[in-house]
Each structure stands twice: as C-alpha cells, then as structure tokens.
Amino acid sequence: MRVLVTGGCGYIGSVVAESLLTAGHEVVVYDSLVTGHRNAVPEAAVFVRGDLADAEALEDLFSRYDFDAVMHFAAFIQAGESMEKPGLYFQNNVCNSLRLIEKVAQRGVKRFVFSSTAAVYGEPKDGLISEDDPLAPANTYGETKLMIERMLHWYGEIYGLRYAALRYFNAAGAAGARGEDHLPETHLIPLVLQVPLGKREHIRIYGSDYPTPDGTCIRDYIHIADLASAHLLALEALAERPNLTYNLGNGKGYSVREVIDVAREVTGHPVPAVEVPRRPGDAPVLVASSERIIRELGWQPRYPALVDIVRSAWAWHSAHPNGYED
Ligand SMILES: NC(=O)c1ccc[n+]([C@@H]2O[C@H](COP(=O)([O-])OP(=O)(O)OC[C@H]3O[C@@H](n4cnc5c(N)ncnc54)[C@H](O)[C@@H]3O)[C@@H](O)[C@H]2O)c1
C-alpha cells in the first residue's frame, strides 16, 4: 500500500513509518516540522514538508500521490498546554484534521488510522480502562481527540471511510535509530533519563500521597515497537472491518517510583528524586485493558516489561544525548 504518514517526523510517526517500510509499504511523510525532526524520517520514505493548515499544499500532495491509506499522527500533544491555549489545540488538532479527513473523503481514500489517546476517558472508577468506559476528557487535548474520533465516525457513515482509532496510553522506549525527542519533554521516562545524562539534577515526583501502594501515580507504558505493530495490524484489519477502536497499553501499571527505580537499575546512576505537591488533574491510576485488540487482531506486545522499555530508551538517549540535534 502507499501510506501517507502525517507527523512522520515525530516520535511515534517516524517509528511506524519505518515499520511500514519494513513490511513492504510505500511511505510518504507529510510534516511541518513544528515539533518534529527531519532526520527522524526513514531514508526510504518520501518526505514532503507541509502544514495540514495549508490547503494548497495538501491539495498538491493528494494530486501528486494516490494513497491507499492515511496514518494521522500530526497533532499538538501536551495536555497541560492545551489547558492554557485551547485555541491552539482546537485549531491544529481539530480544524487541521478536518481538512485532512475531508480531503481523504474527496479522494476516496478508504483507510484511516488515527492516533487517539487515553485522555479521551474520564477519571476511571476502578480497575482497567476498557473501550466502553465513559468518554469524558479532563483536558482540551483529550477533547480534541474525541472530536476527531466523532468526525471519523460520521465520515465512515456518510462516505464509507474505514478508520481505526487507536487510543494510546504512554508511548515509551526506542526502536533502533529512533527515540523520543520532544521539546519541551513532558513524559516521565525521558525526563528521568535526563538526570543520568547530566541535563537535570533531579526528577520531581508530583504527589506522594495518592491512594496507591507507594503513594505515587500509576501509569501504563507501552513500548513504541508494540505500538507500531498494532498500527500495522489495524491497517490490515480495515480490509475486513469498517471501524475499529482500540486501547493500546500494557494492561499493567507502574508507579512513578517504580519508573525511577528501574531507571536507577538500568543506568547505574542514583537519580535523585524530590517530592513536590500533586499537580491538578493527575488521576491516581490510568491503566488500559488492551484485551480487545489482543482478542480481535491477535496483537502480542513483545516488550511489556518496564525494564525492557527503559533499557531501550536509555540505549537511544545515551547514544543521542542531544536527541536528533536539529
Ligand atoms: N507520545 C505519547 O505518549 C502519545 C500518547 C497518546 C497519543 N499520542 C498521539 O500520538 C501522535 C504522535 O505523538 P508523538 O509523541 O509522536 O508527537 P510528536 O510531537 O513527536 O509528533 C507530532 C508530529 O506532528 C507534526 N505536526 C504537528 N502539527 C502539524 C501540522 N499542522 N501539519 C503537519 N505536521 C504537524 C510535528 O512536527 C511532529 O513531527 C499525536 O497525535 C499524539 O496526540 C501520543
């Protein structure tokens, strides 16, 4: 298939682009580089620099290439920022996705794989979050993703667009030459690893009085290579099924303290930690049930162990202490 990968200069898009190429697909990456890195794009992919906001550039892209499928990663991704600048998020995530989806429908592209998020759920009562849990985003970032899911539903109904909404929990780790390089970085594992890299003196623990075994928040980390394999399965499955919605997580949570302990073990660095008050809006526990994609598509996460995730992240960060350096 010829697959358009929006946001293919970013962390997840670049890894999935590489997996698509390995599986024998053709890849065209479309990215404005607003937060991404040109040298994250696999060599065998075509790179087109452009913004989803640019209607002319998008028209030009779709007239130059006939796509069999679109994988849509391009977005702004910081939940905290989305509560300070909601307009930025509605504009880039919702309006620009609408422009893309409209183009996809006009051109008759039938498969669309969308990067959704755990942030579409409200605060869970107890246990693992399943796809049928209430949708009640606690921030505008999650709201934008839910709005895009709803748009996809209607484009499916009206134009027959086949779509997969993949709700990722915390993507983590590295895959070969590609790793996590966000600016600013807001994700726990790369932040912890900045300490042994000498880029920060300590890691902050926001809240140590949560109702969890060690008092710190528990999150679900999914290895980037396992995320990538789920994208390929979803792309294939759309041939048989018109729409898919799946959680992508580990089914197992790790506390902030556990992540720090594993980082100490993997890096051999003491990684000093400082406890500070809770941040508003942090749920105590967010863990996915990915049972549906395991059952329906036979997805098998290969790296569920936190130590493997942190080890792969550390291998990448210690080899690329300044990230992609562009
Ligand atoms: N990283 C995570 O843990 C996580 C968790 C849940 C969901 N997601 C979703 O996965 C997707 C990818 O996340 P990521 O961590 O790789 O983010 P990222 O910031 O590394 O990548 C996003 C890419 O999109 C590009 N982009 C943004 N707006 C654009 C526009 N208007 N036009 C063209 N390109 C544009 C950026 O330049 C960047 O290369 C996002 O949609 C995000 O919401 C990520």
Image (tube, rainbow, N blue to C red):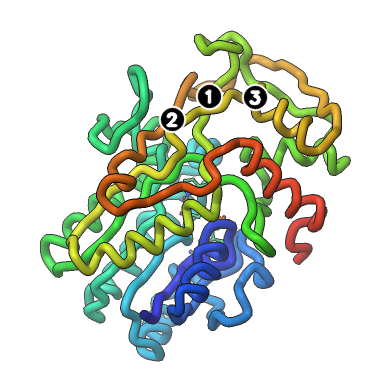
Answer left or right for 240 relative to 86.
Answer: left
Judging from the image, what secondary structure is the residue with disc 3 in? helix
Spatial CA span between label 2 and label 1: 8 Å
Label 3 neighbourhood size at 10 Å, few (<14), some (14-19), many (20+)? some
Q: Amino acid at mark 3?
A: Glu
Outermost residue, left side: 158
Q: Nearer the viewer, residue 248 or 277?
A: 248
Residue at image point 47% right, 78% down: 27
Depth check, front residue: 34 or 300: 300
Q: Name the residue: 34% across, 28% down.
A: 122
The answer to whether residue 92 is left or right of residue 106 is right
- Residue 238 picture quarter: bottom left
Q: Name the kind of residue labelled 2 in the image.
A: Val
Q: Is the Cβ of the residue at disc 2 closer than 8 Å to that at disc 1? A: yes
Mark sitting on residue 258:
3
The answer, for residue 266, to whether it is visible in the render is: yes
Q: Which residue is mark 2?
A: 287
Tag 3 near tag 2, CB within 8 Å: no
Category of crowding for the residue at label 1, using alpha-carbon neighbours closer than 10 angstroms: few (below 14), some (14–19), many (at least 20)? many
Residue at the spot of label 1: 218
Q: CA distance from mark 3 to mark 2?
A: 15 Å
Dot 1 amino acid type = Ile
At x 76% / y 40%, what residue is drawn? 193
Earlier-in-chain disc, 3 versus 2: 3
Numbered label attached to residue 110: none
Real-space CA distance between mark 3 and mark 1, rounded to the nearest whole angstrom: 9 Å
Q: Is mark 1 within 8 Å of ligand 1?
A: no
Viewport quadrant of the N terminus:
bottom left
